[in-house]
Image (tube, helix red, strand yellow):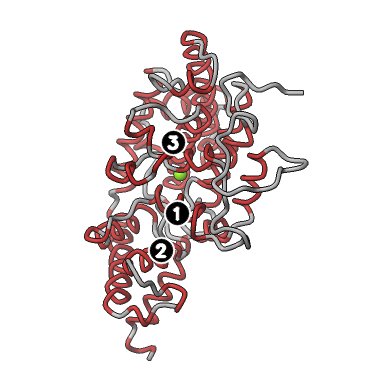
């Protein structure tokens, strides 16, 4: 049997669930968490939520669902190589984007702006709200009743003000300790996944070009190696061969650098692994290379005029919906009517929408021709 490292999270050292639940008979506690996430409604919505490209722009672009699967796959490989809890990283990865609004960061920024007077909106906290409260599947409790470590992994970062409201889950932000090594892996696996797939999707969309990417060292050196090995290669195969090399080099670097940090710090247990500096890390060289890649994507893809048009439209849709529902909550589906903070329930409703549902809902409320 595969043995976990002493500083890995396990069913035995878990801080457990908020509500008493019977033992998981043929699964670990974290397999059970993963299964609950996969069966949730919020998980299925990920299929129709996007990050950079809106759903209808093409069927081959990443959605939040395929992104989450890529993150899980990368994180599992890293966890297994380091004898950490593979089931936990899978659960965290599959849940990490559940709280995202439609239209990626544009939607989140718009909703956060709308919610400024009502406590703000952070997608990490919304993911937690979904797994802790909003999913309605169990008779005995709200939410999915996940283990502490899975919930902790979902809250990648949050403001100190919000951390104070999170109780035990927020403590690490206040005392500056680290989340589990498994949660740290998911954060970096997320980075590996999105940087690489944004290059791939960016090229596929034609918004960025291979020529431009020659200026990014991480891409240029691997593309050169591919061209040297396979003379005359170009098009999709060149792109895929280059991207798979970039992913591989990042994953190997992450495993090796982390193994080196662990060997140096010698954490004895989970508490040791959580204190001090984050042990899961890239080498300096690859951290810099990734920063360069991020800067490139920011400038040439996320700020591309065609993407900005979409972003601005998405923000308008989200803020129009918000104003309409807040000014007359009676237009909301009755389940979203609230006694207290009505704006929060409006945010729940909007955040839960898929891209196409938000577009449709906007049309229902605002398209005069459709009355
Ligand atoms: Mg992500």
Residue 369, given in percent of the width and then of the height, sits at 35, 89
Which quadrant: the N terminus?
top right
Residue 85, given in percent of the width and then of the height, sits at 61, 30
Q: Quadrant of residue 84?
A: top right
Contact between marks 1 and 2 (CB within 8 A): the answer is yes
Q: CA distance from mark 1 to mark 2?
A: 9 Å
User: Which is in the foreground here, disc 1 or disc 3?
Assistant: 1
Q: Quadrant of residue 284?
A: top left
Residue 322, given in percent of the width and then of the height, sits at 31, 70
Which quadrant: the C terminus?
bottom left
Tell me if residue 55 comes above or below residue 67 in the rendering: below
Residue at numbered disc 1: 129
Residue 59 seen by the camera: no
Of all residues shown, which one is farthest toward the top? 264
Residue at numbered disc 2: 348
- N-term mark: 1 or 3: 1
Residue 250, given in percent of the width and then of the height, sits at 49, 26
The numbered disc on residue 191 is 3
User: Which is in the foreground here, disc 1 or disc 2?
Assistant: 1
């Amino acid at each position: 049997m595969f043995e976990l490292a002493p500083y890995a999270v396990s069913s035995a050292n878990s801080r457990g669930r908020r509500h008493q639940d019977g033992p998981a008979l043929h699964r670990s506690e974290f397999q059970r968490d993963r299964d609950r996430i996969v069966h949730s409604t919020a998980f299925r919505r990920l299929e129709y939520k996007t990050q950079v490209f809106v759903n209808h722009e093409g069927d081959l672009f990443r959605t939040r669902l395929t992104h989450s699967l890529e993150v899980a796959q990368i994180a599992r490989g890293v966890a297994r190589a380091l004898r950490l809890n593979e089931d936990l990283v899978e659960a965290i990865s599959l849940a990490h984007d559940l709280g995202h609004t439609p239209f990626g960061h544009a939607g989140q920024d718009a909703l956060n702006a709308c919610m400024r007077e009502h406590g703000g909106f952070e997608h990490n906290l919304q993911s937690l709200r979904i797994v802790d409260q909003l999913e309605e599947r169990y008779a005995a409790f709200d939410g999915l009743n996940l283990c502490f470590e899975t919930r902790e992994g979902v809250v990648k970062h949050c403001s100190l003000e919000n951390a104070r409201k999170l109780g035990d889950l927020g403590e690490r932000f206040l005392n500056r300790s680290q989340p589990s090594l498994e949660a740290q892996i998911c954060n970096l696996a997320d980075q590996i996944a999105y940087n690489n797939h944004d290059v791939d999707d960016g090229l596929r969309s034609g918004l960025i070009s291979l020529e431009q990417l020659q200026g990014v060292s991480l891409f240029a050196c691997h593309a050169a190696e591919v061209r040297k090995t396979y003379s005359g290669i170009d098009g999709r195969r060149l792109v895929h061969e280059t991207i798979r090399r970039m992913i591989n080099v990042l994953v190997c670097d992450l495993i090796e650098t982390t193994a080196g940090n662990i060997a140096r710090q010698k954490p004895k247990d989970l508490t040791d692994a959580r204190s001090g500096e984050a042990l899961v890390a890239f080498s300096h060289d690859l951290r810099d290379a990734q920063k360069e890649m991020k800067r490139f994507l920011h400038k040439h893809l996320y700020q591309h005029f065609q993407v900005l048009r979409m972003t601005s439209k998405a923000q308008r849709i989200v803020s129009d919906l918000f104003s309409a529902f807040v000014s007359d909550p009676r237009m909301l589906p009755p389940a979203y009517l609230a006694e207290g903070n009505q704006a929060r329930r409006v945010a729940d409703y909007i955040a839960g929408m898929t891209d196409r549902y938000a577009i449709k809902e906007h049309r229902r409320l605002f398209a005069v021709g459709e009355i």
